[in-house]
Amino acid sequence: MELRITSRENEKVKQLCKLRESASFRQAQNCFLAEGVRLCRDIAAVWPPLEVYHTDKVLEQHPELQDLPGRHVMISQSVADKISDTKNPQGIFCVFERALKSLDQAVSADRWLVLEHVQNPANIGALLRSAAAFGFEGAIFCADCADPYSPKAVRASMSAVARLKLLRADTVAETAAWLKTEEVPLVAAALRHSVPLDEADGLRGGKIALLIGNEGNGLSDEAVEAADLAVRIPMAQGVESLNAAVAGGVLLWHFRGV
Amino acid sequence: MELRITSRENEKVKQLCKLRESASFRQAQNCFLAEGVRLCRDIAAVWPPLEVYHTDKVLEQHPELQDLPGRHVMISQSVADKISDTKNPQGIFCVFERALKSLDQAVSADRWLVLEHVQNPANIGALLRSAAAFGFEGAIFCADCADPYSPKAVRASMSAVARLKLLRADTVAETAAWLKTEEVPLVAAALRHSVPLDEADGLRGGKIALLIGNEGNGLSDEAVEAADLAVRIPMAQGVESLNAAVAGGVLLWHFRGV
């Protein structure tokens, strides 16, 4: 029997909205919501959706979406409008399992992106996207980063949120201690007390954990102290900083593993 | 006599709002609006504002703003709220002269960023910011790019909009012809029919014009054909693209002049 939801007041619709809005609800349910043809398809290529919600219209335009695994539910356009995080919803939503682990559940990898206090979901997503593009295997979220499973972060990551191993730690110090046992050098991005990027060329292409801090304030002093080395991107005189996602992209490119 | 505006219906207030909203009005008036303490101060360090609008409150917090050149006008908080492009206006606005020239008015420079059909003002701003940071001297806007003098672009540029020479051209082909007379090689960023970035290392640090296209569709075929060389950023398997501002930042960094 085909499942179909047409009421915006349906209990399941309310849950999907909560999944969109609330980081603590995503954590409690251990899943997240992805929206849009491209994004749902790309994440489903990495791991299967638990649930798939689609309008009649999107199936007509993209019949291949019928082949997505998971429980399929047909929804009305009005329900899609309610669930959506965008102005022009395409009418397809997938619920995926979250895979954020703690350090004691971590598997080894040679190349990590480590974030401290990164607050903007679009920056989190862009950084994950760049990390996946440049051969990093995972990301570690320290302190109070924005949730990588928020709709904005998931969308900006372009499926990297599913491609990368994701870990959660309370502090950078704790992460640094774990990385030491893994023999992965921790390199902090810091404007002061740091060497120009070119002086860290010896670390290119090998094991590395690249540590990036808050958009406005950079890394905490404790985080920089916990790192094995601090680097900065050389800039022209009179220019003080770069866009956070761009700075992260340049650093990830410099230490790329591709 | 101190000038003071307290009515939101004042004719000057309407003009400032139009300056914020309309690219054609900015062009007709040959000026643009910048907002915020940091941004106004940074642009004023490059060239003097024509007019300065501020609330009592922002002057109390930042008395040094009184020393900005140009005609000063005190405004009420309610007027500041009306003029502002942000949710929490700081209460300071400067009107600056635009300096967008056509190719036949151009002065020579060794390093240019060339944009075709770049549509997102925040991307335009971030690209200008990266260009200034990495030692590029100017930017050339071809075809229908978003206006670099919109509030979003100006803010994202972090004063680079004033630091760089800005030129306007109808087509990339016309720009390519001009660059040829200047003996500046034109390098296109293109995913297909291109060489990996490392193969263009010979061009690092020297004369270069770096050509970047639309966020979703990349460069037009004509633009790629007009270029002397096409390069791509190598990426891990399964990853198709980068955030537009990040891709531009990596390319500008690779060909940096700092």
Image (cartoon, coloured by chain):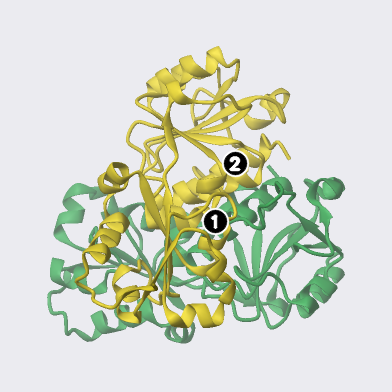
Chain colours: A yellow, B green
Quarter of the figure that contains the N terminus of chain B: bottom left
Which type of secondary structure does the marked residue at label 1 adopt? helix
Seen from the viewer's position, the closer of residues B215 and B2 is: B215
In the picture, residue A72 is in which quadrant?
bottom left
Looking at marks 1 and 2 on the same chain, the residue that comes earlier in the sequence is marked by: 1
Instruction: Identify residue type, mark 2.
Output: Met
Q: Position of residue A16 (x, y in %)?
A: 30, 60
Is residue A133 placed above or below B177 in the rendered structure? above
Secondary structure of the residue carrying tag 2 is loop
Name the residue located 71 percent from the left edge and 67 percent from the top edge: B107
Amino acid type indicated by mark 1: Ala
Question: Disc 1 designates what residue?
Answer: A44
Q: Are marks 1 and 2 on the same chain?
A: yes
Count residues near mark 2 (Cα–Cα under 10 Å), then give few for <14, some for 14-19, many for 20+. many
Q: Which residue is mark 2?
A: A235
Residue B13 seen by the camera: yes
Near mark 1 (Cα within 10 A), the count class, few <14, some 14-19 or many ≥20, is: some
* Image location of residue B156, percent across then percent down: 46, 59
Residue at 31% from the left image edge and 68% from the top image edge: A83
